[in-house]
Amino acid sequence: MAAASNKPGPVHFALISFVILSVVLGITTYMFHREYSDRAAKIAELEGKSSSQNQAIKKMDDEVQALKNLTGQKFETVLDPSNPTNPTSVSGAAKKDINDFGQDLSGVNYAETLQKLREALDASRSDVASKITSVADLQKNLKDQQSRLNSQIDLHRSAQEKSEADKRDVISNSNERLTTKQKEVDRLNAENNQSLADLAQERESRTNERKKLQKDVVDLENRIDFMKGKIDALEMISFEEPDGYIRRIDTTTNSVYIDLGQADGLKTRMTFGVYSKEGSGVGRGAEDVKARIEVTQLIDAHLAVARVIQSDLTRPIVPGDLIYTPIWSPGLIEKISIVGPIDLDNDGRSDREEFRRMLAVSGCILDNEINDEGERIPAGGKITVQTKFLVVSDIPDASQIVGVKEKEIAAKIGKQNKDLLSEARVNGVRVVKFTDFLAHIGYLSKRRLFRPGDLRPYTLKAGAASSSSNESIGDRTSDGKTSDLFDKKKKSAPQSSDGTTSKLFGK
């Protein structure tokens, strides 16, 4: 029984629970009380700070109001963050005043702007003071100069009065002498007028005489040219000695051997005209040239080989025939002058450079040349007695040309041709046509090289067989056009094949 009474019962458990609950409540109460005390202290602290901030805010508001009153900008908005230059804000209005009133002297704030304006004002005041001082000095100098000028005016007035008195005396004394001199001048003028009339009559007489002499000179020159042309046409007298002769003919290679070589200064590529050995001379008309040859090989001192580049079947080359070129002489440098267009192959294009190279091979030089622009080269050059020929090509007629520039060039070439003919006549220089000159030097136009795409017309040689008997050959002029496949400008992209073959292979 005693053991059973010592076991904890409901009362014990209730007591334990009460104790635990009391402890928990005590601890909770303590904690709540402590937190309340801390919050009360915090609230008191915040209230103190709020009071201080309210005082600071009031102070700042007072200061802002004072600044507004000082700047004169009493807008409610001090600064507009979205629009710093807003003129209805204190800051924006201040910036506008700085820019409007400061202009070139405006700074970043009122202080800097006012400082610059003050400096500018001080400088202006200093400049004004300096100019006031200068004006005072100038006024003083002006007053001094006016005083000196008045003194000089008085002095000059006295001198003028004396001069006028002297002048009246002089005039009175010289009137008689002037009358005498005027009579002498009238006499001299009459004599001078008579002399001028005699001089004008003499001048007119001399002018008429000079015109008559000039006309006589022109008539004589025309008569000389006419008679010279008539003599050349009727008699065709030789004016040159041959350069050499044909020694032997090689019909298998269509070449000849001539009696000129290295010792004579001969060069390859030089050309000669061939003249008959029975003729009366060389260098006459182009019809006297029976063949043309070009030097290809120098064999010995006085022996060379030349290929025949043109010959006449009715007048074959024979040993002893004479050879001649007007642009080469052993040991000498020949000079010629030329005027007019140079077209060696009749293709309508200038071959002036090719002509120069051809002359250079023979050691010949152009002492006067009228280029394609109508300018003389060298400028100021003249035909002299050392000039061997004046070669004249086809001179363009300015009256038949339409283009303004082309007409001017043709007129210049015509004027230069007239001047060169006059110089040649005075110096006794022979005038030769361009075609005759080419015949004399043995030149033969080279065959034109075909170039794809060149649209210049081609004249084909006759003699091709017709497709039927007795069919007319017709016009053999070609326009020079080729297939578009040979023209880079018209060439299209490579054509592709579809692989289809002829039906003959499909059996």
Image (spheres, rainbow, N blue to C red):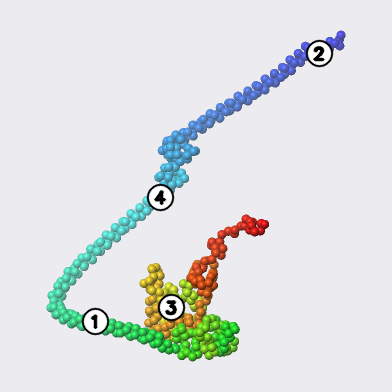
* Secondary element at image label 2: loop
Observer-side mark, 3 or 1, equals 3
The residue sitting at the front extreme is 469
Residue 141 in picture, x, y percent from top left: 29, 60
Tell me the distance, in whole angstroms, between the alpha carbons under discs 2 and 1.
179 Å
Instruction: Identify the residue position indicated by label 2 in the image.
Output: 8
Q: Is residue 28 left or right of residue 147?
A: right
Nearer the N terminus, badge 4 or badge 1? 4
Q: Which mark is residue 204?
A: 1
Tell me the distance, in whole angstroms, between the alpha carbons under discs 4 and 3.
85 Å
Identified at 48% across, 84% down, the residue is 289
Residue 414 appears in the figure: yes
Picture quarter with the C terminus: bottom right
Picture quarter with the N terminus: top right
Q: Quadrant of residue 92?
A: top left
* Secondary element at image label 3: loop
* Secondary element at image label 1: helix
Observer-side mark, 4 or 3, equals 3
Tell me the distance, in whole angstroms, between the alpha carbons under discs 4 and 1.
84 Å
Instruction: Identify the residue position indicated by label 4 in the image.
Output: 120
Nearer the N terminus, badge 3 or badge 1? 1
Nearer the N terminus, badge 4 or badge 2? 2
What crowding class fits label 2: few (fewer than 14 Cα within 10 Å), some (14-19), or many (20 or more)? few
Instruction: Identify the residue position indicated by label 3 in the image.
Output: 393
Closer to us: 246 or 318: 318
